[in-house]
Each structure stands twice: as C-alpha cells, then as structure tokens.
Image (spheres, helix red, strand yellow):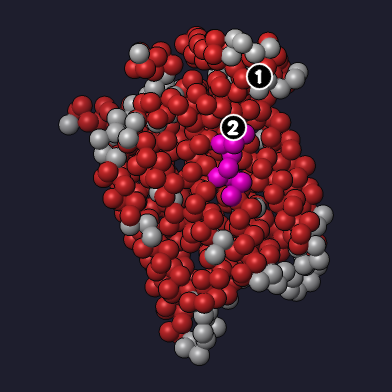
Amino acid sequence: MKANLTRWRAAVAVYGQRSMLHMLIFGFSCGLPYMLVFATLSFWLREAEVSRSAIGYFSWILVVYGMKWLWAPLVDRLKLPLLHRLLGRRRSWIGLAQTAIALSLLGLAWLDPALSLQNFALCTLLVAWFSATQDIAIDAYRIEIAPQEEQGSLAAAYMLGYRLAMILSGAGALYLAAWFSTGEGYDPVGWSHAYIVMAGIMGLCLLNTLLSQEPVQSLASIEKDEEDAALALERTAHLPLPIQRMLSWCYGALLCPFIDFFRRYRWQAFWLLLLIGTYRISDIFMGVMANPFYVDLGYSKEQVASVAKVFGVIMTLIGTGIGGLLVTRFGCRPILTLGAILVVATNQLFAIMAWLAAALTPECANIACEAPSIYWLMAVISADNISAGIATAAFIAFLSSLTNVAYSATQYALFSSLMVLFPKFLAGFSGVLVDDMGYVWFFTIASLIGLPVLLLIWLTKQTQLAPVNAENNSKRSE
C-alpha cells in the first residue's frame, strides 16, 4: 500500500517541473491554429451558408497534417540561416512557424467565405501548412527534452495547453465573433475581428519559444548522423563531390528514419502503422460534422461556445490529466486499449442525441427542428471529451515510445501524419453521408468504425514499447 502511494506521488510530482510549463504553452500554440481551421472554421462556413457537402470537402485541407512527414526531414536536418545560430535546431523552426501562422491568420481575417471561397481555402491551407510544420518541431522538442518515463506527463501537459487553446480558439472565437457583430444573422465583420485577435495571441506564443531551453543533441545522435553520412559518401564515391554531399544528406535525412523503423520492428511494423493510421478514425470522422450538427439542432453560438467549447474542453482536460497519470502508473498499452473502448462507446451517444432530436420533431428529415435539452448536450460532451482526453494522452505516449531520438522529428511526423491522413480523407465525405442518411446513421457508423482498432491493439501486443536512442539502436543493428 505504501509503495503504491509512493509511486502515485512520484507520478504527480513530475508535473511540477519547468519543462512541463513550457510544454503546456507549446501545446497551446499547436491547438490554437488547428481549431481555427477546423471546428471554428466549419461554424463560420455554415453561418455563411456554405453547404454541408462543401464543408466536408473543405476539411480535406487538414490532410496537410497527414502529409507533414514529407517535409519533416527538412525540419529535422536543415539549419535555418541566422535563426539556427540564435535559437538552435528546434526552436528556430518553432519560431519561424509561429510567425508565419500569425500572418496567415491575418490573411484569413480579411476574407469572406461567402464572397471568395477559393481564396479563403487557399489562405486556410497556408495556416494548416505552417501549423503542421510547427507540430513537427514541437513534437521533436518534446521527445528530446525529457527521458521516456516523463513522456506520458509531457503528453498530458501538451494536451492541457492544446485544450486550453481549444477553449480560446473555439468558444473564445465564437464569443468574439458574436460580440463584434454589428447585426443579426451572418456578419463577416465579427468573424474578421475574432481572427485578428487570434492572430495576435498566436504572435505572443513566440515568447515561450524564446524563453524555453533548446534540447541538447546527444553525442550518440550526432555520431549516428555522421555514420549515416559516411555510409552514403562511401556508396557514392564515384560521383562528383557536390552530388555526393547532396545524396549523403538525402540518405541520412530521408531514408534512414524509415529504414531504422522497419529494421527495429520488422514484420510487426505493418500492424503498428495500421494501428497508428486508424486509432483516431472514429473521433476525427465524427468531428467534422459536430459543429454543423449543433447549428442544425438550433443551438446558438453562445450555447455552443459555453457547452461544447468551454465546458467540453474542461472535460477533455480532466480526461487528459487522468490519462497522463494512468499511463505513468500502469503503462501505455492498457490505457491505449481503455481509450479505444471509451471512444467507441461515447461517440454512439451522439447518435442517441440525434435520434432524440428527431423524435421530438418527427416531421423533420435529417435534422431536428427543436434542440434537445442543453443538459443532454452537456452530458454527451462530458462523456465524449473525457474519453478523448484519456485516449489522446495514451496515444501520444505510445507514438513517442516507437520513436528513435536520432530521427525524432521525421519518425514522429510520420506517425502523427498517419494518425490523421486516412481519417481526414474519410471525413471529407462526412457531409455527403449526413445529407444521404441523416445524423443518426452517420454517428452510428462513426462509432462502429472504431471497433477494428481493438483488434489491431491485440495484434501488436508483443511489440516492445521502450525508448530507443541512437546508441542502443546501433547495437541492435549490428
């Protein structure tokens, strides 16, 4: 009993470290732009009378987050002129991305989707691309700044900041848009001012980057880089020196991270990648239609802001904190399984909510004319967000455990890209599915497609979840 109590105290004490505060703010910096091009943006588009089908297709912009592994090697290896010398390898990329996100949000603020949807989509793409670049650098920073046993707590701190940003860029943006509006109905001026405020807050996140500590690149990691480069030079010795150097860089930056992963996990790599690509499928597929669902049910911006974007995010924070403690206490895999079960179960509550709304007003086809009680919305969002928080904390720790610190940015970018690539593509058809089948069947399908994840977790149960650094990786490769 006393030993268990000591372990619980040690798990809680980790949260008092300075690195946790910086990671919380880094999580905030990542969550702010994501919400502004995802859930909040879908509310703006629907209010501007953009069709549900178009909103679903619009979500394909977020596939950028699933393609970030393509340029992750640049973030991992390329030294930015001047910034690298001033801030270091990781912070230079983080600072550059944060500045670019703030400027791109200002571009969104000056556009009206009702008048120029194509230009609006292009500017949204820029925000998403720079946001994905920031994610690459911050994920690598998190993996390198602390040992593996603290990754679960760091993931919880990251998600805490991420969800606080969701309150601000979700509920805060909705409140600001309503406050700045000059009349009833759709008013682009209110949305414009809200996004200007968000751009200013994004700019303030740069201070955390300047004040944080750059991770120290381990000697073993440097030696691994040199080993990769030497091997590539040896194989291209017959070519001109400039071409040798270019091929050497490409080999070390582009090929070695993937070779390393498949060498370590061999045949299990397939099941691991499949699990990574589908673990969040239920939540992501359902999430695109959540805000249009609230609008169609008749909830006001203020109600959605208060319940879904403030109260709901608080529930996610609670779930994230619980998830971080559970991972630290019981390990990653049991909580990974628990999170998958909870997500499937709680997403089905949205189908029940849609059925209840249709039952209240049976003359409505796909949506309800009268919204269910606000307390029902609170109950559904509480259950859903707590389960999502637990699942996300466990999943981030799981991805970190698969990463070799010698290739942290590239490998984690590959994993996190796979996490959203297929679900985001599938989510692009969510609006069409709602139009054809209605919300009840849509949410039922969104819940059921999460069941195969449990099978994949069982198939990968033999996989060793342990930190891998450049030194022990070299020994295993011999």
Q: Is residue 177 left or right of residue 360?
A: right
- Outermost bottom residue: 363
Image quadrant assignment for residue 332: top left
Judging from the image, what secondary structure is the residue with disc 1 in?
helix
Relative to 96, 222 lies left or right: left
The N terminus, quarter of image: top left
Foreground mark, 1 or 2, reads 1
Residue 304 appears in the picture as rendered: no
Write the residue at 31% across / 47% down: 456
The overriding secondary structure of the stretch rendered in magenta is helix
Say which residue appears at 42% left-offset and 29% top-offset: 261
The residue labelled by disc 1 is 246
Rendered position, 393 above or below 61: above
Q: Position of residue 420 (x, y in %)?
A: 51, 48
Q: Which residues are magenta?
A: 63-71
Residue 107 seen anywhere in this rendered image of the structure: yes
Residue visible at 72% across and 56% down? 121
Crowdedness near tag 1: few (<14), some (14–19) or many (≥20) residues, C-alpha within 10 Å: few
